[in-house]
Image: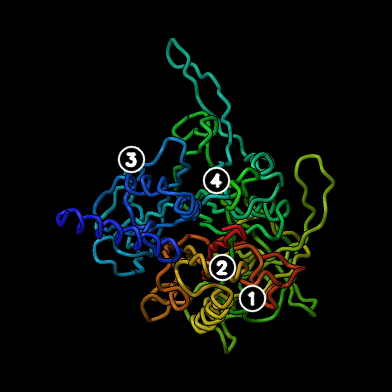
Amino acid sequence: MDTEKPSSSKKKKKTIEISSLADCEDVLHNILSRLPAKSFASAACVNKSWNCVCNSILSRPRIASACSFKASAPLVKHLGPRTPIILSVVHGVMGRDALTDEFREVKFQDHEDIGVNRGICTCGQQSGIVLTVGYLPGLKVDAIPLLRRKEIVQVPVDDTYVDVYLAPPVPMIDQFVMDIQNYTTSVSGCASPVGIIMFGKEDMDQKPIIEKLDYAMSMNTVFVGDERSRFAYRSGDDLRNVCGNPAFISDAVALVFASDKDKPHGTGEIQFHLAMSEGVSAIGPRHKAVSVRANHAEGSTWLTAKREGHHEILDGEQILRHIDQLENRFPQVELYVGVTKRRKCSIGSEKSRLITTLAFHGIRGGDQEYLYVDGVGIKTGDYFQFYQPDHNAALAACRNASENIRNLKLNSSGKGFLGRRDVANSIDRKEVLGGFIFSCCGRGNSFFGGLNVDSFPFFENFPSAPLAGIFCGGEIGRGKLSMTGQESQEESPAEHRYLHVYSTAYLVISYSAAPSE
């Protein structure tokens, strides 16, 4: 008798403790979310209440990110065969060091010594890797490439014939856009996805590609990415996996995030938010293009122009001499022209409509005949403005970006996790899952004279949320520049801007719990 009573007492006491935990769902949620897989599965079978808590944990999205600065690292070994993957060679990375947990912004001295082969990323001595993985219930995700199919021509060599692949001059942009629309429609019921992270081929002009996407997608769709990179990808659809196939060229790839129309009941909503830090300032008067010649072989445009309000036609030497003599001209920094383009645009056979965009082109130089700029697509009559990198403007824009991101913080829990009681009391409050940064390779410590300036707007507001970033060859950023979902005063609705220079694009991903959770 005496030996059984203590055992009975202990058992009763244990039952009381479990019962009290069940009454405190926040604590229970926190404990169960830390269990290993087998223990978690057992906990889900205890009772209906515990099962509901376990289901809410499983339906909550997660993002994890880390950096490695070792010589090489396996990136895809432990990911499932249907998991979409994009590997990209960039100019630098931002993220938490996997060994020290220190957040670092690291620019590479030479990104040409970085390679990707069979899921292994190999680095030089002054380089590294940033890896981000995510579990996003309520969204369907896939990698969709922009392809060019090469023509096969048989060429006689000695006594036989050899197949030679000839690349067509124009990529299938309309097909690319329709592939994204068709995929999104199939999984969500609408043609515009929640967001797109895009990587463009470094020797391909991405302006007409992003222009078509901008035209076709709702303004609620956020675009970010790297305009010029070297990439490899794997799609969840084997028919799209043509990397290494000599019959195809991949000019770009889009990681598409679309709402899941068949998402389980009780799954919350994931949203993409955009903030921008522009790093250039306007200089000099506006000009109007007069004589324009496109050199497609070199990927450049030759032009003459006249200043707005004047009739004299100026050559490149005259234009640049006037710009260099301005008081606010910074010596020995790059120059760009921002060209306002008003063009007809359409997808497939649909009726075209006019859109107005601001496109940046780098200045190559000028002589007594022409002003030479990077890229094509400029026409006679287009107006353009000169721009130069400006670290003071960039610092001010970083502060504005921080304030913009803070608007999302004020509408969130301010924590890395929404407790179940928080959800019940405030369904509209958001949890920030993490973020991505796409920053110009010309920025960083050498541009600002300080460390981690580009990542500061995010970390100031969400220091514990996962964050990863890259230094780009050209920043893609398109969407409503407001964390509250309203139009920003900084963005003119009549002029679309999606490719930037000396700027940083911030993608913030938030989660709103479903009312039933």
Spatial CA span between label 2 and label 1:
54 Å
Foreground label between 1 and 3: 3
Q: What amino acid is labelled 2 in the image? A: Lys
Q: From the top left corner, tell me how far across and down residue 88 is, in percent.
A: 43, 50
At x 62% / y 40%, what residue is drawn? 171
- Find disc 3 in the rendering and name its residue: 77
At x 52% / y 61%, what residue is drawn? 474
Element assignment for label 2: strand
Q: What amino acid is labelled 1 in the image? A: Gln
Name the residue furthest left. 3
Element assignment for label 3: loop
Few, some or many C-alpha atoms within 10 Å of disc 1 (few <14, some 14-19, many ≥20)? some
Q: From the top left corner, tell me how far across and down residue 239 is, in percent.
A: 54, 30
Name the residue furthest right. 351
Q: Is residue 470 visible?
A: no
- Find disc 4 in the rendering and name its residue: 141
